[in-house]
Image (tube, grey):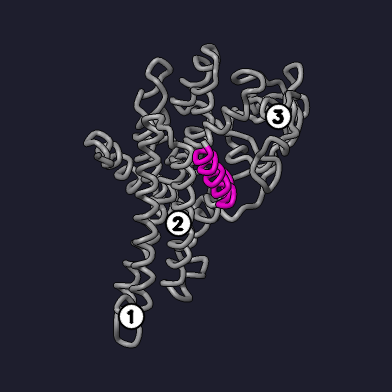
Amino acid sequence: MNFDFSDDQKMLKEQVNKFLTNKCGYDVVRRVLENDELYAKEVWDGLVEMGVTGTAIPEEYGGLGLGALELCVVAEELGKFAAPVPFSSSVFLASEAIKLAGSEEQKKKYLPKLAAGEIIGTLAASEGVQAASLRSVKASLKDGKLSGVKSPVPDAEIADIAVVLVNTGGSGDKALSLALVELGASGIKKERLKTIDPTRGHAEVTFDGAPAELLGGEGAGWELYQRVLDGAAVWTAFEQVGGADSAMWMARDYALERYAFGRQIGSYQAIKHKLADMYVKNELARSNSYYAAMMLNDNGAELVEAAAAARIAATQAYVYAAQENVQAHGGIGYTWEANTQFFYRRAKLLALSLGSQLYWRERLVSQLEARNAA
């Protein structure tokens, strides 16, 4: 069984890497972090021009017509550069939700604009610090009017549309539905939230009778949301693997150039152990992510377990690599001037995106228990 990417996929990976190397250096990430910019517009525009925002959108809706694996290679490259762009919100979440649940009219209206970068999308599910659940969703949709508060919503300040998980009054797992709302409409208020990584903005969004329409059937929201979440978990895992690799190589490079007591610090056993542990965790995360990518691409029976395992392993690898990268740099690693913070901030943010490690562990265990019981 071949778990490697094809030559075309590797070519896409190289093209995205080359673009980001030239256009998304640490100076760009620092500029967005230190100023009032919500994202790096020139980087986003470049990605749009390359067509990668439409990677997995079918050609009949203005996309490239590729698939899940191509999005995996793009996600990994974006992670390597801690790119300050709304790619995951617009592509992994909003576009995929509309692809999965949208009517033909909705797909024709929104997917070409998302593919062309004319609009940016997001997904609003949580209503507090915990992950969304059947019981926690209070936002409601009635007679085409959406009311409630969603927080935190990724990239909400720059998003033009949002897919919103709402309560439509059914019972059990049929209580929730997905709604599609244009964020420029009346009855919508956005308030920026403070997060550990301001290069990926989040906001609280209040809906007060905002006009919205169903996305998918009424009562099908929870099932649809879970399917979108599984795909996003796989792509986010690749983003985390990319970031973990960059943090590891940053630590390695510094260990080779920094001298203490007449020796490279990389020659000391403690630093060697840190780097070796980073490498092992990164490769474990990569293996889990590759398997999850195969399940996602083939719609495999083990997708839910594979996505959860990839998410857990990638989160652990990225957080560990980011923390040990700071440690390897010593005192300078804790300063504002150090670039180590970019990966530390992003690792901590992604660790909570789409649900915490606890959420994904419970999802993995419950799925395994259900499978064994059957």
**Foreground residue among 167 and 42:** 167
Tell me the residue that label 1 is attached to: 268
Query: Which image quadrant for residue 126?
Result: top right
Q: Are marks 2 and 3 in contact (CB under 8 Å)?
A: no
Of mark 1 and mark 3, the one earlier in the sequence is 3
Query: Which image quadrant for residue 38?
Result: top right
**Foreground residue among 14 and 171:** 171
- Report x, y in % for residue 229: 53, 36
Q: Could you say whether the residue bearing mark 2 is in a helix, strand or loop?
A: helix
Of mark 2 and mark 3, the one earlier in the sequence is 3
Residue 123 in sight from this viewpoint? yes
Of mark 2 and mark 1, the one earlier in the sequence is 1
Instruction: Name the residue at 30% across, 41% down.
Output: 13
Instruction: Please rate how many residues cluster around mark 2, counting C-alpha atoms within 10 Å: few if below 14, some from 14 to 19, many from 20.
Output: many
The CA distance from mark 1 to mark 3 is 58 Å
Which amino acid does the dot numbered 1 rest on? Answer: Tyr
Which amino acid does the dot numbered 3 rest on? Answer: Gly
Tell me the residue that label 2 is attached to: 318
Instruction: Please rate how many residues cluster around mark 1, counting C-alpha atoms within 10 Å: few if below 14, some from 14 to 19, many from 20.
Output: few
Most distant residue in the left direction: 7
- Report x, y in % for residue 312: 49, 51
Which amino acid does the dot numbered 2 rest on? Answer: Tyr
Magenta extent: 352-373
On screen, residue 95 above or below 310: above
Instruction: Name the residue at 41% across, 34% down.
Output: 296
Q: Are marks 1 and 3 in contact (CB under 8 Å)?
A: no
Main SS, magenta region, reads helix
Q: Could you say whether the residue bearing mark 1 is in a helix, strand or loop?
A: loop
Tell me the mark number nearer the camera, choosing from 2 and 3.
3
Q: Which disc number belongs to residue 172?
A: 3
Q: Could you say whether the residue bearing mark 3 is in a helix, strand or loop?
A: helix
Magenta highlight on residue 271: no
